[in-house]
Amino acid sequence: MDKWKTIIREELWEITKSRLCDYTPARQEIFEKYRVTLRQAPTERYDVVKNVFIVAQCWNEVMYYEEVEDGFSFSIIDENGRILEHWCNQDELKCALWHWMVSPQKYRLVPAEPIKK
């Protein structure tokens, strides 16, 4: 059995670039519009705090990469950069990009309810 090895920033960037090459110009454009320098942000996943990589941001909504599920999802972040909503269903990058192609979440400017402990 292979030992789990967490993804590093450079590896995620290479994966992202290679996937983008196969996408339509519209998807590539939306990624370029919202992409950010990859950075880690804390999130809570089943009562355990871990870091995920933020790959893009539109106002206070971010697209982040979840390595356990090998996919992309969205959340708003708080003023400290913490991911406030953890979702169990992640999408391939091309599907996730559709989210901002259809409706950028500029109106989601209030934080989600705090995570109950």
Image: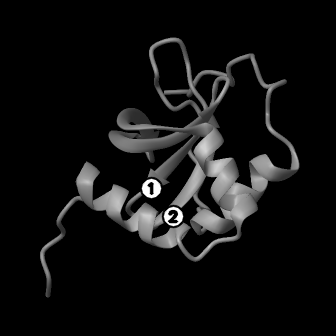
Is residue 13 depicted above or below 3 in this figure? Answer: above
Figure quadrant of residue 96: bottom right
Q: Residues within 10 Å of mark 1 (few under 14, many from 20)?
A: many
Q: Amino acid at mark 2?
A: Gly
Q: Amino acid at mark 1?
A: Glu
Figure quadrant of residue 2: bottom left
Q: Which residue is mark 2?
A: 71
Horizontal side of 10 relative to 77 (left or right) equals left
| Furthest residue toward top | 79
Residues 2 and 71: in front is: 71
Figure quadrant of residue 51: top left
Is residue 81 depicted above or below 56 in this figure? Answer: above
The image shows residue 57 at horizontal and vertical percentages of 59, 34
| Furthest residue toward bottom | 1
Which of the labelled discs sits on residue 66, or is there none?
Answer: 1
Q: Which quadrant of the rendered structure holds the N terminus?
A: bottom left
Q: How many marks?
A: 2
